[in-house]
Amino acid sequence: MNSFLTAFHWTHLLIIPGLLIGYTVHELGHALMAYFLGDYSQVERGKISLNPFQHISWLGIVAFLLIGIGWSKPLRSNPYNFKRKYLDVFFVALSGPLANLTLGLVGLLLTLVIAAILVQASGAPTEGVLRYLFPAGFPFLFPMMPELPERINLQAWSITFTGYIAATSFWLTIISLLPLPGQDGFVALISLVTFLRERRREPEAATHLQPAAMIADRPITLLSQQQRRNNAADIHFKVGTEFHEAHKYDDAIARYRQAISHDQYFGPAYINMGLAYLVKGDRKKAIQAFRGALHYADDQRSETEAWHQLHQLSEVSPINDSAAQEIMAEMGASPWTDTKPRPNWLGLGIVGLLFLASGILLYSYLFTHLIELLKIS
């Protein structure tokens, strides 16, 4: 116990900002890759955010401080949300370590640039400046003896936001790539092996089924129940929107019902069915369809759209029947096709700019005081 306390120096806590930044960048890399590959649920889970509290696990950070291996809040994703399924899961798994590697390289480059500017501005020797910013040493760059600060001072803040951010990001990259359960390396390995096995099975299954499974020149494809359900629901929904746009509302409603029968939680089908009923002048069934979206839809965007439609419909007076029919027909004339949830790109950009401005102010403060300190020393 005493040896452990002796080895644990208080400056180990200075990696916490690096962990917060590193895990945020790591999980945001996962979430953005998943979103662009087709898993839009990351928006509703709040994973496409620069808020560290959406990504970090305090228990994982404590474990990292104690044993050097930690974790963040895991990204939840379904392979059937992706077009290439397990191959896309492989790319999503690697996107987090790649984001950390990029951050580490940027952090190391920034630290070396800061060191070079300090050497030129203060006239201090290069070795002294590097020893100041890299107190624990980087043996592969230059040998040093540890010179850790004994209290919170300018050096402590300097190494926190320079060398420690780079070192923490590199270490997170290495740890996450380990083929251990719970780490990205394990997920990437399993998903890649699964993808290769399924790819090898496809021609074998097609050859095996061809003599007995050809019906009207169409081969039967082996799909899981969930994959078959989602594919069928999506197909019926898309055909329904085509009927809707062609003003064939009865056919559209039939297709939307088929989509719901294959996937009870398919919110957009409830919304469009309600819109089709509005065109037909059936206010009661339209309200039932919108309420169905509120009750069953598994995505926030459909619930929001259902509330919007119900609010608009509440403002249509049922007393003047002819005017109400005209307004409802206008409301439901076009199907709702903008069904994919989108991140708040504006908010993400604003928060990013605020972080950038804070970083500029922080490094300007460090520059000014470090130059003065190095000149004196």
Image (tube, rainbow, N blue to C red):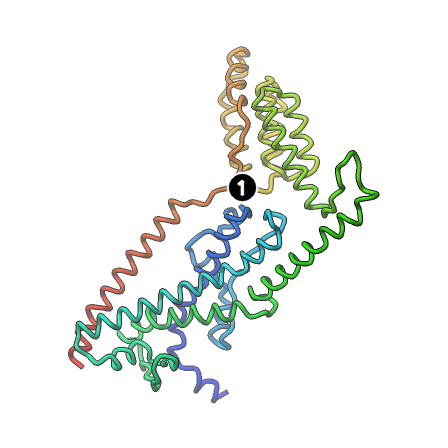
> Residue 244 appears at what percent x and percent y?
59, 24
Name the kind of residue labelled 1 in the image: Gln
x 75%, y 41%: residue: 219
* Element on which disc 1 rests: helix
* Residue 326 located left or right of residue 235: left
Residue 366, compared with residue 149, is above or below; it is: above
x 26%, y 73%: residue: 115
> Within the image, what quadrant is residue 321 found in?
top right
Q: Mark 1 highlights which residue?
A: 300
x 54%, y 30%: residue: 336
> Residue 160 appears at what percent x and percent y?
34, 71
> Residue 365 appears at what percent x and percent y?
23, 66
* Residue 241 located left or right of residue 148: right
| Rendered-image quadrant of the C terminus | bottom left
Residue 58 or residue 194, whichever sits in front: 194
* Residue 93 located left or right of residue 50: right
Residue 320, compared with residue 91, is above or below; it is: above
Residue 239, compared with residue 87, is above or below; it is: above
